[in-house]
Image: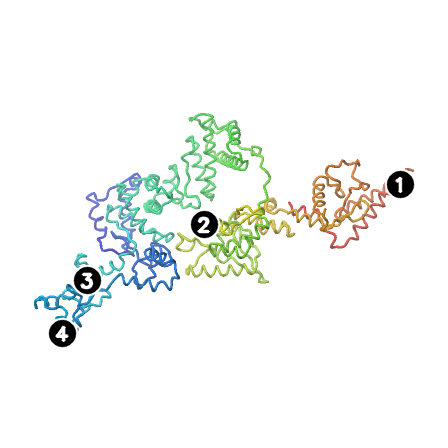
Amino acid sequence: MGRTGEQGVSNTLSGGTAAGGIRAGGVDAARFGAGHLLERLLSAVRPEFRHDIFIPDPDSAVFFTATCALPSCPAAIRRTRIGLCERHHAWWKQAGRPDLPGWLGLAEQRLRAEVPEVPACAVGGCNRAHRRSRLCVRHVCAWDRAGRPDWDHWCTEQPAPSPVNESGCRFPACPRWSEPTTGFCAAHRRRWIAAGRPEPHAWFDQLAHSLDPRVDLRGLEPRLRLEVQYGLQCRHDAASRLTRMIRVTTAVRLIREAGVASLLDWEDERWHAYTLCPNSVGSAYQSFILDTCAALRNLAGVDPWQQQYPRAVWDLRALDLAGSQRRLDFSRIEPGWLRELAKQWARWRLSRGNTGQSVATTLRACTLLGEHLCRTAGAGAGPEHLTRIVLESWFAALAIALSNPTSRAKRINQIGVFLRDVARHDWCPQIPHSAAVYEGDMPRLPPPRPRALSEHLMRQLEDPVNLARFPTDDGRLLLMILIQCGLRLGDACKLPLDCVVRDHHDAPYLAWINHKIHGRVAFFPISTELADHITVQQRAQQQRWPQGCRYLFTRYQTNLDGNKPLHASTWRRHLDAWLRAIELVDEHGAPAHVTAHQFRHTVATRLINRDVPQSVVQDLLDHMSPAMTARYARLTNATRRRHWETAMKVNAEGDPVTVAPEHPLADADWMRLSLVRAKVTLPNGYCGAPVQTDCEYANPCLDCRFFITTPEFLAQHRRQRDDSRQQIADAEQAGLARVAEKNRRTTAKLDKLITVLEHATDSEIVVGGRRENNAAG
């Protein structure tokens, strides 16, 4: 694995332990014993990592990915840069980024010109390396003995040496004859002596990899050296992220300057503060030190919860729970008893599968509650001071501090869940039972606004010319999936590689996993074109990861084994850059911004306005309840108008009521009918009077000139006609002629109205009311 010309540390460790060369250091070392950890380190670190100068093999994808594309360049590239080392990548940029295959030949000639071969002796036929005056050692001595005559004449008269007894130089690719005793030509003999006469094969290997990444550990104490070597070994075995030797070199320098005997002498918080980079919170060398500390604790058999629980900041990586949230900060929660309750609650929540991000949001709410409690009851407030009155005063303070009712409701709900869990598990009996959050404590939320994108924006987003400008091919495919299928971004990034299934009609479906509902599998019908694009992406992934990968979209960095999905934040950055590039504008010409989740609302709204039943939309989006689907799928005004125009409308006289779509007052009439329908809906129809008109009739009846009805009210009309006929019979029997005559007029109007509605064609009759209400719900 590693190569070095220096002495290893195993002898130093074995000979220096008793003499005090290895010192027990730190709280952690004292807890499990320095000798115990040292014994495990000596048995755990493999020989290929026990070198004072560690040079990884070029085929190691952890420490670098490949060698330089120039054949004569011995350097190994430290990161993926079109197959060039950093020096020759700079050459390529200086040349104007030309076509790489054609440029490589010119760069190879330039590289060879910079390394001239050893010149031969000027005497014809002599293949020895020149020493002085362009002559080899033998000929320069002969020229001196001859009194240094004319150089050109003398060289011409010298006989050509016989190559029979000559041998080639031992240095690789050197064409000159060797000098006696050493086997090197004169030039390489001088280089070999200057290097300290090393073993030739080791010297050749060292020279061949002189530009390879490496890390020098000679400045560390033996134990620290062994701990860093174990950290390098763990990085290699994990094979999850690229580790550049220059970053490890920086980490080694910081460790040496810290003056510790062991990495476990300091807690993680101290290492984090000591190695904090001003420009980057999560520096690579800082991560290497912290990861090595965690690996050492695991090697010593230390319980990670025992390490993390007492700390003010938990490192979720040490607990193997790191996701988008890497740390949980309890340091700002006051008073202390509330902080301990928050720790106990967080450990329980994490152990039952909650994400670190969801726990972190509740911790922020606990911080706000603790600050309010200290303000109202003093810094020494105990659990008994957390009363219902304090909670109500906190609600009032939140109303001032957080003007957004949605944000305020989230904080109150999080505290309600926290207090409920504390009371249920009896973690703090001193908290009064009245300290609870009720449903009525939530602020009144405004109705959710429609988030679907307008068709004006969608035409720009779906334009093939604009789609072709997306920064990456796989990112463009992910965008197409969001537009056509309405997946959540997190679910789309985690699509399995084999995500297309087909039914018995060979129709393609996108099989996706709803991670919000505990990994439930859902299906969405897709077009053949989208299925073909997914097939192309699958082939690209198989070529990129011949050993196999799990996801259709994989992360670009820190993903050496191909088993990490594309990070949502990476795709969001690409989306924002693409929106700026295509100059997306709204209907008023102003720049527009789009989020990934708006595509989900747009898909639902498009489906519901294409007369897809809401139950089907719910299944396609894999929602748990129709109410959630109703928040996504909104009927547009155009759809409602289309339903109204296709419905058969009849007035009180039984005459059809129509307004031609091309009529100048069509839009105004539609808006009027929409307003009055929203104002007055009668048992047997609608009131067509303007909103501002006072009704002159005591009850809705057929004599009103504003009365309008549709076929959906046939049942009410028939029932009213039967009632009127019964009233006529009763009036005639009682001798009430006027009552009977009035009901005969009503019956005649109902007969005409019912006849018209019953004889309307199928194309004219649409069950508008009930169907529309269900879709809008």
> Hey, which quadrant is residue 180 in on the image?
bottom left
Q: CA distance from mark 2 to mark 3?
A: 52 Å
Which mark, by number, is residue 741? 1
Q: CA distance from mark 3 to mark 4?
A: 26 Å
Q: CA distance from mark 1 to mark 3?
A: 130 Å
Q: How many marks?
A: 4
Q: Nearer the viewer, residue 316 or 701?
A: 701
Which corner quadrant holds the C terminus?
Answer: top right
The amino acid type of the residue labelled 4 equals: Pro
Between disc 4 and disc 2, whose residue precedes? 4
Helix, strand or loop at disc 2?
A: helix
List x then y, in percent, for residue 690. 74, 39
Of badges 2 and 3, the one in the foreground is 3
For disc 4, the neighbor class at 10 Å (few under 14, some 14 to 19, many from 20) is few
Q: Which residue is mark 2?
A: 570
List x then y, in percent, for residue 359. 46, 40
Which mark, by number, is residue 159? 4
The amino acid type of the residue labelled 3 equals: His
